[in-house]
Image (cartoon, rainbow, N blue to C red):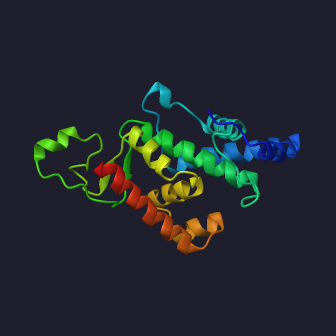
Amino acid sequence: MAVIDPQTFEQLKLIPEKEWEIIFKKLVLYSELRLTKVGFMPRTEKDVKNGEDFANDAIEKLFSGDRAWDFIRFPDILIHLKGVAKSLIWNHIKSSSNAIVKKELTSVIIDNSEDIDSYTDVVDKDDPEAIMISEGNWIEIEKQFGDDSDGFIMFCDWIDDIPARDIAREYNVDVSVVYNTIKKGKRIITKVFTN
């Protein structure tokens, strides 16, 4: 179980309660907009989560130390929390049944048609560019990004069909950082699919 860094905890305590209320409201709104944008529809009872749930989860993970905040490099706590919420929403959607990633990421070569039954993640026969990715593999993909949670979030944005330049603008990084992150994500997915 993760433990919050004492310096991070001190930084969080410096944020006034009134500011936390504003941060929370903005985070709920952001989460609701993300859910609307991706058109997420609950398929099972466990899928029923709203923006407030994701905002609470993001703040909880921040205070528990599960999602570390580098307050020196990224001083805006709201941007960090939005990234955490976006990652939680992404993981939730991917764990929901019939979650499909619509990007040409990599091709999985299957020599024997009988082998296809042994894959938990398979290329959709109707849409060869759609790849089904199981919850376990999404967890593994995120794990492979390691401490680079920002990279994982930028990669998720790219998979969501957000152009690299828009991602760079949103996270205030050079577009080359985004392109390198996309390459890294493709390598990770290839590794996960071929192991």
Q: Is residue 60 visible?
A: yes
Q: Quadrant of residue 159?
A: bottom left
Q: Position of residue 112 (x, y in %)?
A: 10, 48
Whether residue 163 is visible to the viewer of this picture, yes or no, is: no
Residue 90: % across, % down = 51, 46
Number of marks in picture: 0
Q: What residue is rendered at 29% in x and 58% in y?
A: 129
| Residue 48 to residue 122: above or below | above
Q: Quadrant of the N terminus?
A: top right
Q: Which residue is pictured at 83% across the width and 47% down the height?
A: 11
> Which residue sits at x=54%, y=74%?
176
Q: Is residue 138 left or right of residue 118?
A: right
Q: Position of residue 91 (x, y in %)?
A: 49, 42
Closer to the camera in the image, 129 or 5 = 5
Judged from this view, the residue extending furthest toward the top is 45
Q: Where residue 47 sits: x, y (%)?
A: 49, 31
Image side of residue 27 versus residue 104, left or right: right
In this orientation, which residue lies closer to the viewer: 145 or 89? 145
Q: Is residue 190 above or below residue 116?
A: below
Foreground pick, 43 / 176: 176
Q: Looking at the rendering, which quadrant does residue 64 occupy? A: top right
| Residue under the point 31% across and 53% down | 130
Q: In the drawing, does residue 132 fall left or right of residue 181? A: left
